[in-house]
Amino acid sequence: MLSFSPPSPSVYVRFLIMQPFKFVERFLVCYLVCGLNCIASAAYYYGSGSGSDFVRARGSCFEAGGRPFYFNGFNAYYLASLAVDSRPTVSLIMSEAAAAGLTVCRTWAFNDGAYHALQLAPGVYDESSFRALDFVIHEAQNKGIRVILSLVDNYASMGGKAQYVSWAKDAGASVTSEDDFFRDQIVKSYYKNYVKDVLLRVNTLSGVAYKDDPTIFAWELMNEPRCPSDLSGNTLNGWIEEMSAYIKSIDGNHMVEAGLEGSYGPSSSEERQHLNPTGLLGLGVDSERHARIPSIDFITAHLYPDQWLPGSSLEEQLACVTAWIEAHIEDGNTVGKPMLVAEFGSKSQESWRNSIFNAVYESINLSAEVGGAGAGALLWQLCTPDIQGNLASDGYGVSLSPSSSTSEIIAIQSHKMSLL
């Protein structure tokens, strides 16, 4: 049985003592959060191995080792790229996350033809970059953190679907659009080959194949898949069906999710479709339909109210947060699958951002407390001050620094989720 090693209770205490609480608040929260380590340890060590360590979807809830699994988590897409040159920084990020009670990390398990590329050409890999991904997974295990691994990007910054289409075009395929990623058989064969090689990869640090590693929470087919050339959603639905079933044919241990932002399409009611922000219109996505695919284990939503409602008031953004999350939790309850807010963030000043974070967490908590589909939320994105202006340069970086009141909100949410 692979062992997870959450940090000692003293780590939580030191983390919270550094925060700008009043004395009584600091004492009470430190007293409560000391129990988080014991609960996390019990969750990870419960059971006797085999498949009992893997997180599973059981109805609208997650389970690990036969117990409910609720969590607070984070995104750090850049970890494998960072680990090529700076493994100590990756270790620091994981340690800070664990100290704040964050137990699930979403990160990229791809880099197609870009800087520090993992895949140099179809089926051709840079071993140093693959070993960096090995390190990220192994370090997550050491810190008691599970990882959601995304397998390709909708966007071109790290290759993405555009790079796959370019490779196919160079090989003589009749492709004319990035959306041919979802249709062309040559492109799909490239993707399947990459997925197979990742699933069968044996971690050089742990000696465990990725497909057999309970550190991995789930596989994500693509970060924010979109196919605007087919607004019916048929093309994307067929691709999700095919690729999720393909992963399941190789890996019977792990869950699979599509990576969707959650936009509503033709199969949804007009009321649901009216929830779509302008930026999520016309994408060829039909999230309620995709959620019903049998080989998709849980549903996701992304949330950026400052992007979606530019120039709006805080009250308008908070209303958007609540309506968006509650609708997707209801979708999860309807189809009997867990729902994860897989990305959320705000570029606004700290007090505004804190209000957004509190609203996200409150919506998840209200569902989780009654056994609903809301299972957790992953903030976008965790970083350290020295990389905030480099890899994490999108303005959404959250640093767990002593002076950040957001750190307090995150740690308290972690504690609340650990008690469920």
Image: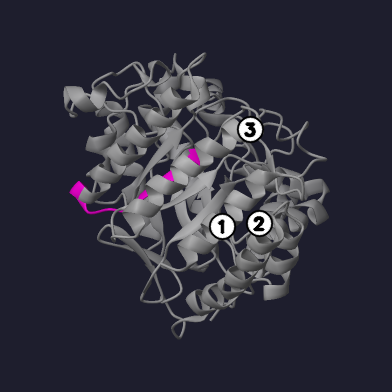
Q: Residue at x 38, y 29 (%)?
A: 319
Figure check: 106 above or below 23: above
Amino acid type, mark 2: Ala
| Discs 1, 2 touching: Cβ within 8 Å | no
- Specify the amino acid type for callout 3: Tyr
Residue 117 appears in which quarter of the rendering? Answer: top right
Residue at the disc numbered 1: 412
Q: x, y percentage for residue 97?
A: 66, 56
Range of magenta residues: 334-343
Residue 142 counted in the magenta span: no
Note whether residue 202 is visible.
yes
Residue 25 in percent (x, y) is at: 63, 60
Give me the C-alpha separation between circle 2 and circle 3: 16 Å
Query: What residue is shown at x 54% (from left), y 65% (from top)?
Result: 215
Crowdedness near tag 3: few (<14), some (14–19) or many (≥20) residues, C-alpha within 10 Å: many
Residue beneath disc 3: 396
Sequence-wise first label, 1 or 2? 2
| Amino acid type of the residue that numbered disc 1 sits on in the rendered structure | Ile
338 within the magenta span = yes
Element carrying mark 1 = helix
Disc nearer the start of the sequence (2/3): 2
Sequence-earlier tag: 1 or 3: 3
Q: How many marks?
A: 3
**Residue 8 seen in the figure:** no
Q: Secondary structure at mark 2?
A: helix
Reading the image, the residue beneath label 2 is 97
Q: Is residue 11 left or right of residue 213?
A: right
